[in-house]
Image: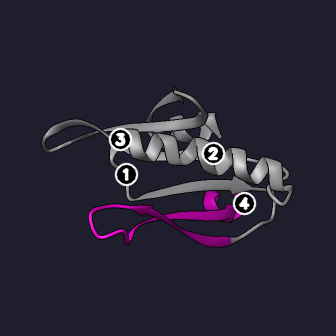
Amino acid sequence: MFLELLRQEKEVFFFRDRKECDFVLKEEGSQGQKITGAIQVSTYFENPAVRKREIEGLMGAMQEYGLEEGLILTLDDEEILEINVGGQDGKEMRKIFVKPVWKWLFE
């Protein structure tokens, strides 16, 4: 995954606060450099403990950098998770796209 992100000319960083996020992406934009994405990679995403850990790590990076969406790459799982993070009206949502690595590589 790291080499593919570099091939796509992304600046790649690791995020760690209370939890970890495998890849945080920084890109050059019209207003300078900005964090534009967060990605977790998980082989066994169906295991409840692994699922919780991966989601929490990704959400930590998303919250830190104000990202609305995140990505979890897996061997073969695919779904869209909508996570309620509260907000002023209690209904602020974040999306996490879960998809197989092979599908992501062909996008």
103 falls in the magenta region = yes
Q: Amino acid at mark 4?
A: Trp
Residue in view at x 75 percent, y 53 percent = 51
Q: Quadrant of the C terminus?
A: bottom right
Name the front one of labels 3 and 4. Answer: 3
Q: How far apart are labels 1 and 3 at the CA level? A: 6 Å
Residue 9 locus on image (x, y percent): 43, 38
- Other-residue count near label 1 (Cα within 10 Å), few / some / many at <14 / 14–19 / ≥20: some
Q: Amino acid at mark 1?
A: Leu
Judging by the rendered image, the residue that carries numbered circle 1 is 67
Q: How far apart are labels 3 and 4 at the CA level? A: 27 Å
Residue 25 locus on image (x, y percent): 43, 39
Judging by the rendered image, the residue that carries numbered circle 4 is 102
Q: Which mark is residue 65?
A: 3
> Magenta residues?
79-107
Q: Amino acid at mark 2?
A: Gln
Residue 88 locus on image (x, y percent): 26, 63
Cβ–Cβ under 8 Å for marks 2 and 3? no
Q: Which mark is residue 40?
A: 2
Q: How far apart are labels 2 and 4 at the CA level? A: 15 Å
Q: Is residue 37 above or below residue 19?
A: below
Name the front one of labels 1 and 4. Answer: 1
Residue 94 in which image quadrant: bottom left
Instruction: Return the disc, 1 or 4, that comes first in the chain's sequence.
Output: 1
Residue 30 locus on image (x, y percent): 14, 44
Residue 93 in which image quadrant: bottom left
Q: How far apart are labels 2 and 3 at the CA level? A: 15 Å
Cβ–Cβ under 8 Å for marks 1 and 3? yes
